[in-house]
Amino acid sequence: MSLSKKIVSILKRKKIKVAFAESCTGGMLSSAITSVSGVSKVFKLGLITYSNVAKKKILKIPQKTIMKYGAVSYETCLLMVNNLY
C-alpha cells in the first residue's frame, strides 16, 4: 500500500478532513492525495499560492510578513494555513 493510500485510510478511519495551502511544493501534496480513490471524503480544498501576489490576494498574507520573514518561512506558512478558510 502506498503512503498516500495509508494516509487517506487513516484520515477516513479517524474522520479527519484536510485542506492544503501549498507554495513551493507546486501542488505535490494535493496531487499525491487526490490520486487515491475515495479521497473526496476527506480532502476538501487545495490551493497553490506560489507567487507573493497570490499569497497576499488569496490567503491575505500581509506584505510586511513576507518582507520580514520571507515567502517561504514558518511565519508565512502558519498564516497560509490559518487563512485557508
Image: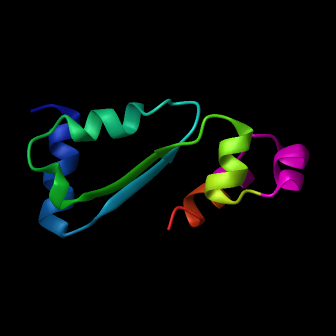
Q: Quadrant of the N terminus?
A: top left
| Tag count | 0
Residue at point 23% right, 40% down?
34
Residue 64, percent across and down? Answer: 89, 54
Given residues 47 and 77, the one toward you in this image is 47
Q: Is residue 65 left or right of residue 31?
A: right
Image side of residue 22 versus residue 11, left or right: right
Q: Horizontally, is 54 left or right of 47 in the view?
A: right
Instruction: Estimate the x, y position of residue 77 in percent, counting from the top left.
Output: 64, 50
The magenta span reads 62-77
How far across and down, in percent of the image, does residue 61 sit? 73, 56
In the displayed structure image, the side of residue 36 where residue 64 appears, left or right: right
Q: Residue at x 26, y 40 (%)?
A: 33
Q: Quadrant of residue 54?
A: top right
Secondary structure, magenta segment, majority class: helix
Residue at 56 percent of width and 59 percent of height: 81
User: Magenta includes 2?
Assistant: no
Q: Quadrant of residue 37?
A: top left
What's the coloring here?
rainbow
Decide: is 15 above or below 5. below
Q: Nearer the viewer, residue 11 or 32?
A: 32
Give percent across and percent down for residue 43.
27, 55
Q: Quadrant of residue 10?
A: bottom left
Q: Is residue 65 magenta?
A: yes
